């Protein structure tokens, strides 16, 4: 069974047992959470339910595995002929979740 969920301003196609990194959620590791379900389909794609915007009665349960930060990316600003150079770094926080059940 597949589902399209929405969290953190993004949409993800998920199935049971899948782990994925989403935008940071304010949950402890080991906590359970329910996610918005935009679409549900069975494994062969015959029975598809699309919500407007959410599917009524559909539920995706996930478990928080860990909170983390992504690899550092470097942001470089440079203007030629003016001796202007700035180097900045950023690590985006994320939450790693595992999809437990799609109902």
Image (spheres, grey):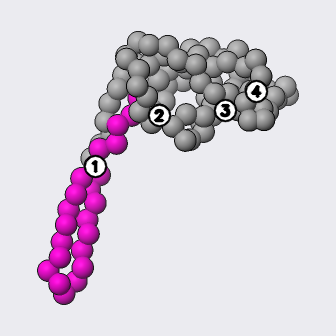
Q: Earlier in the sequence, mark 3 or mark 2?
A: 3
Sooner in the amino-acid sequence: mark 3 or mark 1: 3
Image quadrant of residue 69?
top left
Q: Which sits earlier in the primary sequence, circle 1 or circle 4?
A: 4
Where is residue 14? Give x, y as percent: 61, 29
Disc 1 designates what residue?
90
Q: Does 54 sit left or right of 28 as displayed?
A: right
Is residue 74 inside the magenta stretch? yes
Between tags 4 and 2, which lies in front? 4
- Give the residue number, with chain letter if any, for mark 3: 4
Mark carried by residue 22: 2
Q: The magenta stretch spans which residues? A: 73-95
Choose the circle earlier in sequence order: 4 or 3.
3
Distance from the alpha carbon under mark 3 to that under mark 1: 29 Å
Q: Position of residue 4 (x, y in %)?
A: 66, 32
Asked if 40 appears above or below 32 in the picture, the reply is below
* Residue in view at x 25 percent, y 65 percent: 76
Q: Locate residue 92 relative to residue 78 in the image: left or right.
A: right
What residue is at 81 percent from the left and 28 percent from the top? 49
Instruction: Give the camera-side residue of 30 and 52.
Output: 52
Whole-number angstrom distance, CA of label 3 to CA of label 2: 13 Å
74 left or right of 41? left
Quarter where residue 91 is shown: top left
Give the quadrant of the C terminus. top right
Within 10 Å of disc 4 (Cα), the crowding (few <14, some 14-19, many 20+) is some
Q: Which residue is mark 4?
A: 55
Horizontally, residue 103 falls left or right of residue 78, namely right
Could you tell me how far apart the alpha carbons at marks 1 and 4 are, in whole angstroms?
A: 36 Å
Q: Quadrant of the N terminus?
A: top right
């Amino acid at each position: 069974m597949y589902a399209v969920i929405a969290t953190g301003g993004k949409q993800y196609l998920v199935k049971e047992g899948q782990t994925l990194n989403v935008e940071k959620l304010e949950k402890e590791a080991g906590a359970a959470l329910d996610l918005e379900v935009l679409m549900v389909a069975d494994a062969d794609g015959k029975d598809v339910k699309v919500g407007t915007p959410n599917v009524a009665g559909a539920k995706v349960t996930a478990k928080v595995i860990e909170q983390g930060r992504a690899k550092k990316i470097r942001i470089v600003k440079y203007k030629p002929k003016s001796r202007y150079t700035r180097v900045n770094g950023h690590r985006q926080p994320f939450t790693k979740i595992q999809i437990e059940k799609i109902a």
